[in-house]
Image (spheres, rainbow, N blue to C red):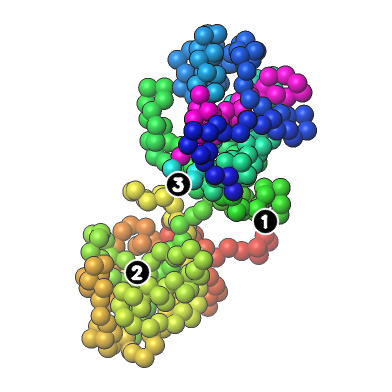
Amino acid sequence: MAEPSAPGTSPPPQPTLRDGDVTIRPWTFNDVEQARLQHDEEIAYWFGFDGIVPSAETQRQAIERWHASYADDRRIVSFLVEHRGEVAGAVEVRRLEGNTGRLSWAVFPRHRGFGVASRSVRLLIGYAFESLGLARVFAEVEPDNLPSLRTAGRAGLRREGVLRGAAATRGERHDYVLLGRLATDPEPQSRDGFLGILNAALPTKRVIAQGILRDGQGRVLLCELTYKREWDLPGGVVDPLESPALALVREIAEELRVDVRPTRLAAVNWLPPYRAWSDAVLFVFDLELVGVTPARLQETVTLERREIQALHWCTLDDAEAHVAPYVMRFLRSLDAAAAEAQAGTGARDTLYLEDGIGGTLQPEGG
Protein backbone atom coordinates (compact mmCIF):
# COMPACT_ATOMS: atom_id res chain seq x y z
CA MET A 1 0.00 0.00 0.00
CA ALA A 2 1.33 3.42 -0.99
CA GLU A 3 2.20 5.92 1.71
CA PRO A 4 2.00 9.75 1.51
CA SER A 5 5.16 11.40 0.28
CA ALA A 6 7.64 12.36 2.96
CA PRO A 7 7.71 16.09 3.82
CA GLY A 8 9.88 18.02 1.38
CA THR A 9 9.82 15.28 -1.27
CA SER A 10 7.96 15.13 -4.56
CA PRO A 11 5.44 12.42 -5.42
CA PRO A 12 6.42 9.90 -8.09
CA PRO A 13 5.74 10.88 -11.70
CA GLN A 14 2.13 10.51 -12.77
CA PRO A 15 1.90 7.31 -14.83
CA THR A 16 0.32 6.47 -18.16
CA LEU A 17 -2.08 3.50 -17.97
CA ARG A 18 -3.68 1.50 -20.80
CA ASP A 19 -6.58 -0.86 -21.43
CA GLY A 20 -6.63 -1.81 -25.11
CA ASP A 21 -7.30 1.31 -27.18
CA VAL A 22 -8.06 3.40 -24.05
CA THR A 23 -5.23 5.29 -22.35
CA ILE A 24 -5.23 7.59 -19.35
CA ARG A 25 -2.22 9.89 -19.04
CA PRO A 26 -1.11 13.17 -17.43
CA TRP A 27 -2.44 16.42 -18.89
CA THR A 28 -0.15 18.71 -20.89
CA PHE A 29 -0.73 22.23 -22.11
CA ASN A 30 -0.75 20.85 -25.67
CA ASP A 31 -4.15 19.30 -24.79
CA VAL A 32 -5.90 22.64 -24.25
CA GLU A 33 -7.55 23.09 -27.65
CA GLN A 34 -8.39 19.44 -28.32
CA ALA A 35 -10.04 19.12 -24.91
CA ARG A 36 -11.98 22.37 -24.58
CA LEU A 37 -13.48 22.33 -28.08
CA GLN A 38 -15.08 18.93 -27.44
CA HIS A 39 -17.12 20.05 -24.45
CA ASP A 40 -20.86 19.81 -25.12
CA GLU A 41 -24.20 20.63 -23.50
CA GLU A 42 -24.34 17.27 -21.71
CA ILE A 43 -21.06 17.88 -19.88
CA ALA A 44 -22.10 21.43 -19.00
CA TYR A 45 -25.47 20.19 -17.75
CA TRP A 46 -24.27 17.43 -15.42
CA PHE A 47 -21.31 19.38 -14.05
CA GLY A 48 -23.31 22.59 -13.67
CA PHE A 49 -20.97 24.72 -15.82
CA ASP A 50 -22.18 28.20 -16.75
CA GLY A 51 -21.04 27.88 -20.35
CA ILE A 52 -20.64 24.98 -22.75
CA VAL A 53 -17.17 25.45 -24.26
CA PRO A 54 -14.55 26.80 -21.84
CA SER A 55 -12.08 29.41 -23.01
CA ALA A 56 -8.50 28.45 -23.72
CA GLU A 57 -7.42 30.36 -20.61
CA THR A 58 -9.97 28.55 -18.43
CA GLN A 59 -8.77 25.18 -19.71
CA ARG A 60 -5.13 26.15 -19.19
CA GLN A 61 -5.85 27.27 -15.62
CA ALA A 62 -7.58 23.97 -14.91
CA ILE A 63 -4.51 22.05 -16.09
CA GLU A 64 -2.31 24.24 -13.91
CA ARG A 65 -4.50 23.46 -10.87
CA TRP A 66 -4.34 19.71 -11.61
CA HIS A 67 -0.56 19.84 -11.86
CA ALA A 68 -0.33 21.79 -8.59
CA SER A 69 -2.70 19.39 -6.81
CA TYR A 70 -0.70 16.41 -7.99
CA ALA A 71 2.53 18.00 -6.74
CA ASP A 72 0.80 18.66 -3.39
CA ASP A 73 0.98 15.01 -2.30
CA ARG A 74 -1.46 13.97 -5.06
CA ARG A 75 -4.49 15.59 -3.40
CA ILE A 76 -6.21 15.53 -6.79
CA VAL A 77 -5.07 13.28 -9.61
CA SER A 78 -6.60 14.11 -12.98
CA PHE A 79 -5.91 12.05 -16.09
CA LEU A 80 -6.64 12.91 -19.68
CA VAL A 81 -8.37 10.04 -21.50
CA GLU A 82 -7.32 9.02 -25.00
CA HIS A 83 -9.27 6.68 -27.25
CA ARG A 84 -7.54 5.35 -30.34
CA GLY A 85 -4.95 8.08 -29.98
CA GLU A 86 -7.45 10.94 -29.75
CA VAL A 87 -8.31 13.13 -26.76
CA ALA A 88 -11.53 11.59 -25.47
CA GLY A 89 -12.26 12.91 -21.97
CA ALA A 90 -10.99 13.02 -18.40
CA VAL A 91 -11.10 11.04 -15.15
CA GLU A 92 -10.22 12.28 -11.68
CA VAL A 93 -9.81 11.09 -8.09
CA ARG A 94 -9.82 13.49 -5.12
CA ARG A 95 -8.23 12.16 -1.96
CA LEU A 96 -10.31 12.72 1.17
CA GLU A 97 -10.02 11.92 4.85
CA GLY A 98 -10.40 8.32 5.93
CA ASN A 99 -8.29 6.91 3.12
CA THR A 100 -11.08 7.44 0.60
CA GLY A 101 -11.31 9.07 -2.80
CA ARG A 102 -14.09 10.78 -4.78
CA LEU A 103 -14.25 9.86 -8.47
CA SER A 104 -15.52 11.87 -11.42
CA TRP A 105 -15.35 11.40 -15.17
CA ALA A 106 -16.44 12.84 -18.52
CA VAL A 107 -16.20 11.49 -22.07
CA PHE A 108 -16.47 13.69 -25.14
CA PRO A 109 -19.32 13.10 -27.63
CA ARG A 110 -17.38 11.39 -30.44
CA HIS A 111 -16.10 8.71 -28.05
CA ARG A 112 -19.31 7.78 -26.23
CA GLY A 113 -20.77 4.33 -26.73
CA PHE A 114 -17.43 2.50 -27.01
CA GLY A 115 -16.93 1.61 -23.34
CA VAL A 116 -14.36 4.37 -22.95
CA ALA A 117 -15.83 5.68 -19.70
CA SER A 118 -16.02 2.33 -17.89
CA ARG A 119 -12.54 1.26 -18.98
CA SER A 120 -10.93 4.57 -18.05
CA VAL A 121 -12.69 4.61 -14.66
CA ARG A 122 -11.51 1.04 -14.00
CA LEU A 123 -7.95 2.14 -14.76
CA LEU A 124 -8.40 5.09 -12.40
CA ILE A 125 -9.76 2.86 -9.62
CA GLY A 126 -6.85 0.45 -9.99
CA TYR A 127 -4.45 3.39 -9.69
CA ALA A 128 -6.32 4.73 -6.63
CA PHE A 129 -6.03 1.40 -4.81
CA GLU A 130 -2.56 0.31 -5.90
CA SER A 131 -0.63 3.57 -6.19
CA LEU A 132 -2.47 5.92 -3.83
CA GLY A 133 -3.23 3.16 -1.31
CA LEU A 134 -6.87 4.14 -0.88
CA ALA A 135 -9.23 1.74 0.88
CA ARG A 136 -12.43 3.04 -0.69
CA VAL A 137 -13.51 5.11 -3.69
CA PHE A 138 -16.95 6.51 -4.40
CA ALA A 139 -18.90 8.59 -6.88
CA GLU A 140 -22.04 10.68 -6.58
CA VAL A 141 -24.28 10.58 -9.66
CA GLU A 142 -27.64 12.20 -10.29
CA PRO A 143 -30.43 9.60 -10.58
CA ASP A 144 -31.33 10.75 -14.11
CA ASN A 145 -27.76 10.43 -15.39
CA LEU A 146 -28.23 6.87 -16.63
CA PRO A 147 -25.02 6.64 -18.70
CA SER A 148 -22.91 7.54 -15.67
CA LEU A 149 -24.83 5.09 -13.48
CA ARG A 150 -24.06 2.34 -16.01
CA THR A 151 -20.41 3.41 -16.14
CA ALA A 152 -20.18 3.22 -12.35
CA GLY A 153 -21.62 -0.29 -12.28
CA ARG A 154 -19.32 -1.55 -15.02
CA ALA A 155 -16.36 -0.11 -13.13
CA GLY A 156 -17.30 -2.07 -10.01
CA LEU A 157 -19.01 0.67 -7.98
CA ARG A 158 -21.96 -0.60 -5.97
CA ARG A 159 -25.08 1.43 -5.28
CA GLU A 160 -25.10 2.36 -1.59
CA GLY A 161 -27.97 4.80 -1.26
CA VAL A 162 -29.34 8.21 -2.20
CA LEU A 163 -28.04 11.51 -0.81
CA ARG A 164 -31.11 13.74 -0.73
CA GLY A 165 -30.55 17.32 -1.83
CA ALA A 166 -26.81 16.74 -1.62
CA ALA A 167 -25.68 19.59 -3.87
CA ALA A 168 -27.00 22.65 -5.69
CA THR A 169 -26.55 22.75 -9.46
CA ARG A 170 -28.54 24.51 -12.18
CA GLY A 171 -30.14 26.76 -9.58
CA GLU A 172 -31.63 24.07 -7.31
CA ARG A 173 -30.67 21.24 -5.01
CA HIS A 174 -30.50 17.72 -6.45
CA ASP A 175 -30.40 14.18 -5.12
CA TYR A 176 -27.35 12.05 -5.85
CA VAL A 177 -26.94 8.30 -5.97
CA LEU A 178 -23.97 7.21 -3.84
CA LEU A 179 -21.88 4.42 -5.39
CA GLY A 180 -18.79 2.92 -3.77
CA ARG A 181 -16.12 0.29 -4.19
CA LEU A 182 -13.72 -1.13 -1.61
CA ALA A 183 -10.19 -2.23 -2.31
CA THR A 184 -11.24 -5.68 -1.07
CA ASP A 185 -14.22 -6.00 -3.44
CA PRO A 186 -13.87 -8.65 -6.15
CA GLU A 187 -13.15 -7.43 -9.67
CA PRO A 188 -16.35 -6.43 -11.51
CA GLN A 189 -15.60 -8.91 -14.33
CA SER A 190 -15.58 -11.81 -11.86
CA ARG A 191 -18.73 -13.78 -10.99
CA ASP A 192 -18.81 -12.61 -7.37
CA GLY A 193 -18.08 -9.04 -8.38
CA PHE A 194 -20.84 -9.00 -10.99
CA LEU A 195 -23.39 -10.49 -8.59
CA GLY A 196 -22.45 -8.01 -5.86
CA ILE A 197 -22.94 -5.05 -8.22
CA LEU A 198 -26.21 -6.44 -9.56
CA ASN A 199 -27.56 -7.20 -6.10
CA ALA A 200 -26.78 -3.67 -4.90
CA ALA A 201 -28.53 -2.12 -7.91
CA LEU A 202 -31.73 -4.18 -7.87
CA PRO A 203 -34.86 -2.61 -6.34
CA THR A 204 -35.89 -3.64 -2.86
CA LYS A 205 -39.37 -3.69 -1.37
CA ARG A 206 -40.53 -3.27 2.20
CA VAL A 207 -41.81 -6.56 3.66
CA ILE A 208 -44.20 -6.75 6.61
CA ALA A 209 -45.34 -9.84 8.55
CA GLN A 210 -48.59 -9.84 10.52
CA GLY A 211 -50.68 -12.49 12.22
CA ILE A 212 -54.30 -13.44 12.73
CA LEU A 213 -55.13 -14.55 16.28
CA ARG A 214 -58.76 -15.41 17.05
CA ASP A 215 -60.51 -16.05 20.36
CA GLY A 216 -63.25 -18.60 21.02
CA GLN A 217 -65.86 -16.25 19.56
CA GLY A 218 -63.95 -15.79 16.30
CA ARG A 219 -62.90 -12.24 17.12
CA VAL A 220 -59.54 -10.97 15.78
CA LEU A 221 -56.81 -9.53 18.00
CA LEU A 222 -55.93 -5.91 17.17
CA CYS A 223 -53.23 -3.72 18.69
CA GLU A 224 -53.92 -0.16 19.77
CA LEU A 225 -50.68 1.61 18.84
CA THR A 226 -48.85 4.61 20.26
CA TYR A 227 -47.43 5.96 16.99
CA LYS A 228 -50.60 6.10 14.87
CA ARG A 229 -54.30 6.53 15.42
CA GLU A 230 -55.44 3.36 13.64
CA TRP A 231 -55.35 -0.06 15.27
CA ASP A 232 -53.60 -2.87 13.43
CA LEU A 233 -52.83 -6.59 13.44
CA PRO A 234 -49.84 -7.73 15.53
CA GLY A 235 -46.55 -7.97 13.66
CA GLY A 236 -43.99 -5.69 12.09
CA VAL A 237 -41.32 -5.10 9.47
CA VAL A 238 -39.18 -8.02 8.34
CA ASP A 239 -35.47 -7.39 8.91
CA PRO A 240 -32.86 -8.05 6.19
CA LEU A 241 -32.01 -11.76 5.87
CA GLU A 242 -35.01 -12.70 8.03
CA SER A 243 -37.97 -14.81 6.91
CA PRO A 244 -41.47 -13.35 7.27
CA ALA A 245 -42.58 -16.20 9.57
CA LEU A 246 -39.61 -15.80 11.91
CA ALA A 247 -40.02 -12.02 11.86
CA LEU A 248 -43.61 -12.37 13.00
CA VAL A 249 -42.69 -14.70 15.87
CA ARG A 250 -39.91 -12.29 16.90
CA GLU A 251 -42.07 -9.16 16.72
CA ILE A 252 -44.83 -10.64 18.86
CA ALA A 253 -42.34 -11.96 21.40
CA GLU A 254 -40.76 -8.50 21.63
CA GLU A 255 -43.99 -6.50 21.77
CA LEU A 256 -46.34 -8.81 23.71
CA ARG A 257 -43.95 -11.17 25.52
CA VAL A 258 -45.89 -14.23 24.35
CA ASP A 259 -44.95 -17.07 22.02
CA VAL A 260 -46.91 -17.88 18.87
CA ARG A 261 -46.70 -20.50 16.17
CA PRO A 262 -47.57 -19.71 12.51
CA THR A 263 -49.88 -22.46 11.24
CA ARG A 264 -50.71 -21.25 7.71
CA LEU A 265 -49.95 -18.46 5.30
CA ALA A 266 -53.39 -16.90 5.07
CA ALA A 267 -52.69 -14.12 2.57
CA VAL A 268 -50.13 -12.13 0.65
CA ASN A 269 -51.27 -8.53 0.30
CA TRP A 270 -49.53 -5.92 -1.84
CA LEU A 271 -49.91 -2.45 -0.32
CA PRO A 272 -49.64 0.57 -2.65
CA PRO A 273 -47.98 3.76 -1.39
CA TYR A 274 -49.85 5.16 1.62
CA ARG A 275 -49.23 8.58 3.12
CA ALA A 276 -45.43 8.83 3.61
CA TRP A 277 -44.87 5.08 3.07
CA SER A 278 -43.69 3.49 -0.15
CA ASP A 279 -45.34 0.29 -1.34
CA ALA A 280 -44.88 -2.97 0.55
CA VAL A 281 -45.69 -6.67 0.54
CA LEU A 282 -47.58 -7.98 3.55
CA PHE A 283 -47.43 -11.66 4.59
CA VAL A 284 -50.28 -12.59 6.95
CA PHE A 285 -50.20 -15.88 8.86
CA ASP A 286 -52.81 -17.69 10.89
CA LEU A 287 -51.36 -18.04 14.39
CA GLU A 288 -51.86 -20.14 17.47
CA LEU A 289 -50.73 -19.19 20.95
CA VAL A 290 -48.11 -21.31 22.71
CA GLY A 291 -48.55 -21.93 26.44
CA VAL A 292 -51.57 -19.68 26.91
CA THR A 293 -55.20 -19.63 25.77
CA PRO A 294 -56.88 -16.67 24.06
CA ALA A 295 -59.10 -16.27 27.12
CA ARG A 296 -56.05 -15.63 29.34
CA LEU A 297 -53.99 -13.63 26.84
CA GLN A 298 -54.82 -10.19 28.23
CA GLU A 299 -53.64 -11.13 31.73
CA THR A 300 -50.50 -12.84 30.40
CA VAL A 301 -49.02 -10.29 28.01
CA THR A 302 -46.46 -7.64 28.88
CA LEU A 303 -46.90 -4.85 26.36
CA GLU A 304 -44.01 -2.92 24.82
CA ARG A 305 -45.41 0.42 25.93
CA ARG A 306 -43.37 2.47 23.48
CA GLU A 307 -45.40 0.90 20.65
CA ILE A 308 -48.59 -0.70 22.02
CA GLN A 309 -51.10 0.86 24.38
CA ALA A 310 -53.65 -1.97 24.54
CA LEU A 311 -54.99 -5.14 22.92
CA HIS A 312 -58.56 -5.63 21.75
CA TRP A 313 -60.56 -8.65 20.58
CA CYS A 314 -62.73 -7.30 17.77
CA THR A 315 -65.51 -8.38 15.46
CA LEU A 316 -65.45 -6.94 11.95
CA ASP A 317 -68.02 -4.36 12.96
CA ASP A 318 -65.94 -3.40 16.00
CA ALA A 319 -62.79 -3.12 13.89
CA GLU A 320 -64.28 -0.81 11.26
CA ALA A 321 -64.30 2.18 13.61
CA HIS A 322 -60.63 1.77 14.50
CA VAL A 323 -58.57 0.41 11.59
CA ALA A 324 -57.35 2.07 8.40
CA PRO A 325 -59.52 1.51 5.30
CA TYR A 326 -56.96 -0.80 3.66
CA VAL A 327 -56.88 -2.98 6.80
CA MET A 328 -60.68 -3.17 6.80
CA ARG A 329 -60.71 -4.24 3.15
CA PHE A 330 -58.15 -6.90 3.96
CA LEU A 331 -60.08 -8.26 6.97
CA ARG A 332 -63.30 -8.43 4.96
CA SER A 333 -61.52 -10.33 2.17
CA LEU A 334 -60.21 -12.84 4.69
CA ASP A 335 -63.65 -13.19 6.30
CA ALA A 336 -65.34 -13.74 2.92
CA ALA A 337 -62.79 -16.39 1.90
CA ALA A 338 -63.20 -18.20 5.24
CA ALA A 339 -66.99 -18.18 4.85
CA GLU A 340 -66.73 -19.63 1.34
CA ALA A 341 -64.38 -22.36 2.51
CA GLN A 342 -66.70 -23.25 5.41
CA ALA A 343 -69.69 -23.39 3.09
CA GLY A 344 -67.81 -25.60 0.66
CA THR A 345 -67.99 -23.05 -2.16
CA GLY A 346 -64.34 -22.09 -2.05
CA ALA A 347 -60.94 -23.61 -1.29
CA ARG A 348 -59.00 -22.68 1.84
CA ASP A 349 -56.05 -21.46 -0.21
CA THR A 350 -53.65 -18.64 0.48
CA LEU A 351 -55.19 -15.41 -0.81
CA TYR A 352 -53.33 -13.05 -3.08
CA LEU A 353 -54.62 -9.51 -2.53
CA GLU A 354 -53.78 -6.05 -3.75
CA ASP A 355 -54.67 -3.25 -1.34
CA GLY A 356 -56.86 -5.73 0.51
CA ILE A 357 -58.93 -6.71 -2.53
CA GLY A 358 -58.72 -9.78 -4.75
CA GLY A 359 -58.84 -13.51 -4.42
CA THR A 360 -56.94 -16.75 -4.83
CA LEU A 361 -54.94 -16.77 -8.05
CA GLN A 362 -56.06 -19.51 -10.37
CA PRO A 363 -53.97 -21.04 -13.17
CA GLU A 364 -55.11 -20.25 -16.70
CA GLY A 365 -58.16 -22.33 -17.50
CA GLY A 366 -58.69 -23.19 -13.80
Q: Which mark is residue 192?
A: 1
Residue type, mark 1 in image: Asp
Left/right of residue 70 with respect to residue 228 in the rendered view:
right
> Image height check: is 101 above or below 13?
below
* Residues in magenta, as a range: 68-96
| Depth check, front residue: 97 or 165 | 97
| C-alpha span from label 3 to label 1 | 26 Å
| Depth check, front residue: 308 or 30 | 30
Q: Is residue 86 magenta?
A: yes
Give the residue drawn at x 52%, y 63%: 352
Q: Dot 1: what SS?
A: helix
Residue type, mark 2 in image: Leu
Q: Is residue 246 magenta?
A: no
Label 2: how many Cα within 10 Å (few below 14, some 14–19, many 20+): many
Dot placed on the residue nearer the N-terminal end, 2 or 1: 1
Label 3: how many Cα within 10 Å (few below 14, some 14–19, many 20+): few
Q: Is any atom of residue 354 visible in this view? A: no
Q: Position of residue 261 (x, y in %)?
A: 44, 82
Q: Position of residue 149 (x, y in %)?
A: 57, 37
* Residue picked out by circle 2: 233
Q: Are marks 2 and 3 in contact (CB under 8 Å)?
A: no
* Residue picked out by circle 3: 98
| C-alpha span from label 2 to label 1 | 40 Å
Give the residue drawn at x 61%, y 33%: 12
Give the residue drawn at x 54%, y 14%: 59
Dot placed on the residue nearer the N-terminal end, 2 or 3: 3
Q: Position of residue 199 (x, y in %)?
A: 59, 53
Give the residue drawn at x 65%, y 20%: 109
| Depth check, front residue: 222 or 183 | 183
| C-alpha span from label 2 to label 3 | 46 Å
